[in-house]
Image (tube, helix red, strand yellow):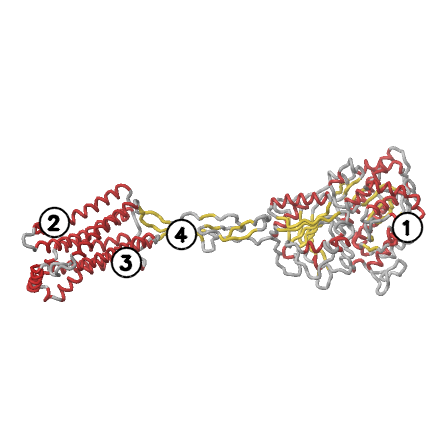
Amino acid sequence: MLLSLLLFLLLLLPGTVHRTKKLPCFHQINPIVSQDGDVVIGIFLSLLSVEVKRVTEAEFFENPPKKACRPYQWLLKNYQQALSLVFAIEEINRDPNLLPNISLGFHLYNTYHSDERTLESSLRWLSGEGQLIPNYGCWEQDKSVAVIGGATSALSVQMGTLLNLYKFPQISYGPFDSILSDKIQFPYIYQMAPKDSSLHQGIIHLMVYFQWNWIGLVVSDDMRGEDFLWKMRGEMAKNEICLSFTEKIPVSERRHVESEDDFMPRIIKSSTKVIVVHGDADSLMILRYSQMPLFLVHKVWIGTSHWDISLRPVYRQGNNFHGALTFSYLTSEIPGFKTFLETITPSKYPDDILLRGFWLSAFRCQNQPENSEQEVCSPNASLETLPLCSFDMTMSVFSYTIYNSIYAVAWALQELFVRKLEQSSVRDGEYSAHHVWQLHSSLKNTQFTNSAGDQVFVDENRSSEAQYAIMNYVVFPNETDALVKVGQFVTKSLLGQDLTLCDDAIVWGWWGSEVPSGVCSDSCGPGFRKILLEGQPICCFECFPCPQGEISNKLDSENCMKCPEDEYPSKERDCCLPKVVTFLNMKEPLGMTLALMAVSFSLLTVLILWVFVKFQDTPIVKANNRTLSYTLLMSLIFCFLCSLLFIGRPTTTTCLLRQTVFGVVFTMAVSSILAKTIIVVLAFRSVKPGSRIRMFLHPRVSNIVVLFCSVIQVLFCIIWLGTYPPFPEADTHSEYGFIIIRCNEGSTFAFYCVLGYMGLLALGSFTVAFLARNLPDTFNEAKFITFSMLVFCCVWVSFLPTYHGTKGKAMVIVEIFSILASSAGLLGCIFIPKCYVILLKVDRNTQAQIKNKRDSRSKIFSGV
């Protein structure tokens, strides 16, 4: 497209020569500032901007063309680049060791952000002042040696399209672009800027440092922007940083008007608070002039070295960029340059119309319209008094690169002249433009140390990696602004030391001193796990508490982990705590209470046994089978005491004895009651004349019943102990935060066989006693046995579901309570009424009383 435009211009050139000479305001559109010399360098800088429109054919043939006199606007801060040019030329011309007896001059052109204007400026440089005819010049063209220009890659390519035809050396001072390193396509373009290959790493290091993972990217829509975007995405993926949005600025879109209404609002509406801006000075003009919201925006802007964040129209404030961080090239200070800027005035360079125009624009006269004929209002003012948005006393990146570029041309000329002098082909001070291409051999190998002590290479393969100073843009309450260095990023430093920051020096904006949160979702703290949202980047998630029994002890855990068996999660589920080993201890209040109850009931049973032994010859004791009563009381004593086996730390011995001793002694007690009820029934039936049942009333029968029933239970216990015996174990799950030391029953089937057999005996006793409950009281204790067995069965029937519904120590407590309650029920229902009669109703415990009741019984049965 550029070549087509060039051919189109060449066809029209004869008709444009006359119009160009008569342009009434050409100096406003394309000012030329020149300084004559033995050799001349062409300089193309972006100092003025005008509204650029698509040129129609009618406008192009317009006479005079109105486009020449369109309003223009000074890019005030860029004028430092022109001053660095003047400073370098003067410094070289004063140096007796560099180009001796040869003066260096320059021609300064303004470049615009359009293909048409760039080609026009290049043609004027090649043709001469005010001319658009190639191969024709109105000044001595043999003095021209090189061109320095190209604040952007696009401008460098546009200029190179034309300059390469004449093999003119072109030195680009804009950001380094790998595309321009293609010497087949661009053989005569040299890049002086350091390589930006580590810029994306510095930005990612900054993101990681402040724990930002949700960012937006604004890049230029060209190969350089795509390369940066590709590198950023790769580095972001390694560090789990997500991209909220990507806004591309079209390179061909140079007018801020086209994007003023919607470009910045699109960015402002995004959810991310951290926005990285990468591009060149040309494409980023949109940010400079786009419509900013009236309210303050809580965004953190991360700029790169080629976005001068302070550059904006004078009438606009920079509050929305307050607190931004920028990566600027870390360069050394050029000695004498700041002093040179401090002494610059229009009177020092009276013939420089560019300086006069800059001064009129920077130091505006009140109540006077701006025009080139007015008097300078502040002729003795200092550039130091200008705000940062208008001028910066610190040498910019572009000024530093232009300074080095001038010196690079000078050193290349020095080497070329020395070589020609040695060959005696030229006289001192003479240089032939027909051999301008010979400068390339010297230029590409040029290397020198500038006055700041920095090593400079023209060869791009030897150029250094850029090191960056991290600057903080601060707007003060009095509307003044400044760039404050708060850190640096040096890639050659040791691992982990490449990024250094002074956190306390950073100003984050108007909303506070704390570091802004640049995340999509707040971090999930310990005790939570993050759940990724469907269709969202990995940085967007929700936090859910860890499940019961699991913990997470770090931020943003994706999974919770279980605690070891001997530990349990804290209430916050952020750590594991050691479980407390516990069991039903005798020292605990509950354990002590149960033990005291067991001992008390056993002593009470011993007391009742003593009463029965003491009053063994009384009728009431004799009438109820003393041997069975003694056996039952002895069994109840052991029933109460066996509950003590359940209190204390379980051991192998106690686990083996617990259920077996309990089962055997309770079986003896229940079988004794069964024997008592059987004897009552037999005794009642034996009183009938001729009854054969009397033979079963022998004391051995009752003993055989007790022994037989007990032996069966003993066999069950032996089988149980011989197959799957109980054993002590640590229960880590029953109670939260505790390890319960308990007895595992081993064989659950054997355990329920023992209980079932005992329940079967109790049910038999209850049935027999219930049937014999109406027999005369003198011979009969069936009523008391019925009540006692009713209590016994109720206790153990309720024990089973309760036992299964509890865990840990509660199971042991339930079983102890059942043992004590059922034993106390048997003791109370059977023996307490007898003791009452023996001790308090002595008159009822006589032979005469028994005889009266026996006579009553005889009458009843005789009537029957």
Q: Which amino acid type corresponds to the residue marked 3 in the rendered image?
A: Leu
Q: Earlier in the sequence, mark 3 or mark 2?
A: 3
Badge 1: residue crowd in 10 Å (few <14, some 14–19, many ≥20)? few
Residue, far front? 864
Label 1: state its secondary structure: loop
Q: CA distance from mark 3 to mark 2?
A: 37 Å
Q: CA distance from mark 3 to mark 1?
A: 116 Å
Q: CA distance from mark 1 to mark 4?
A: 94 Å
In the picture, the disc for residue 701 is 2
Instruction: Answer whether labels 3 and 1 touch (C-beta < 8 Å).
Output: no
Residue, far left? 690
Camera-near label (2 vs 4) is: 2
| Residue at the disc numbered 1 | 62
Q: Earlier in the sequence, mark 3 or mark 1?
A: 1
Instruction: Answer whether labels 2 and 4 touch (C-beta < 8 Å).
Output: no
Q: Quadrant of the N terminus?
A: top right
Q: Earlier in the sequence, mark 2 or mark 4?
A: 4
**In the drawing, does residue 187 fall left or right of residue 625?**
right
In the picture, the disc for residue 579 is 4
